Amino acid sequence: GENVEQHPSTLSVQEGDSAVIKCTYSDSASNYFPWYKQELGKRPQLIIDIRSNVGEKKDQRIAVTLNKTAKHFSLHITETQPEDSAVYFCAANRVSNFGNEKLTFGTGTRLTIIP
Amino acid sequence: AAGVIQSPRHLIKEKRETATLKCYPIPRHDTVYWYQQGPGQDPQFLISFYEKMQSDKGSIPDRFSAQQFSDYHSELNMSSLELGDSALYFCASSLGGNTQYFGPGTRLTVL
């Protein structure tokens, strides 16, 4: 089955600086890579996702890059703000015309933005 | 927009008791997933249903069972509860191969 590794486990960044979180996956059949943000006791919320036919995707201050050959993908947050503090999970699964498989999550990164 | 609904939001049970968690997916979503998240852990997949049929099974104990009903809502039944079952239980739903949206979760505490 799929195995997703995520680094770092904790990250502290000065407000206004950039944060980068990296993930690797093992199953070359995986083709969908979402990132979820989770605040304490709350639900995981999708912040951005990327499919394997795309190398990079950007949404305002958030961007994700994917290297299929190396099987790794990264989340980039620029101009960080205190409200970006949360736990971020990367995930991977295989999506086909017949449905959606389970998400395999990374172990999470606790991001702290220092004012 | 309508979101995934879960009930109850909090549940306290004694060891060896049973619990039933309910999930109402986003309207017209055809796939429901259950995940378990322990403290400080990532969500772990338990089971999923596509069009009311079980589609995949993960690390779900034999003491747990689940089903999806004709109105697409799903229930996770947990018996012989153990202390280690204390966790956040999330339901998520998707339409085909699209994004999985998570519900607010049920916090289960086993005493």
Image: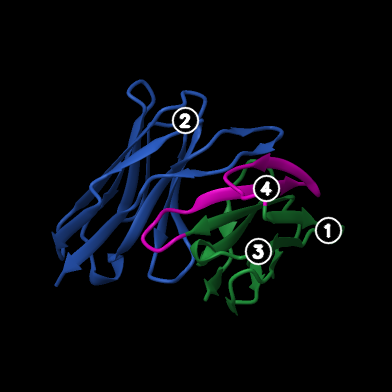
Chain colours: A blue, B green
Name the kind of residue labelled 2 in the image: Ser
Alpha carbon distance from label 2 to label 1: 34 Å
Which residue lies at the image location 61% right of the left edge and 45% below the top edge?
B98
The answer to whether residue B58 is magenta is yes
Tell me if residue A39 comes above or below residue B62 in the rendering: below
Give me the chain letter of mark 1: B
Asked if badges 4 and 1 are on one and the same chain, I answer yes
- The circle on residue A36 is none
Closer to the camera: disc 3 or disc 4? 3
Residue A108 image point, x, y percent = 34, 52
* Distance CA(mark 4)–CA(mark 1): 13 Å
Separation of marks 3 and 4 at Cα, in angstroms: 22 Å
On residue B69, the disc is 1
Give the mark nearest the N terminus, 3 or 4.
4
User: Around disc 3, counting alpha carbons within 10 Å, would you say few (fewer than 14), some (14 to 19), or many (20 or more)?
Assistant: few
Amino acid type, callout 3:
Ser
Q: Mark 4 points at which residue?
A: B48
Residue beneath disc 2: A52
**Circle on res. B80:** 3
Q: Mark 4 lies on which chain?
A: B
Q: Give the range drawn in magenta.
A: B38-62
Identify the mark nearer the N-term, 4 or 1. 4
B16 above or below B98? below
Residue drawn 32% across and 23% down? Answer: A70
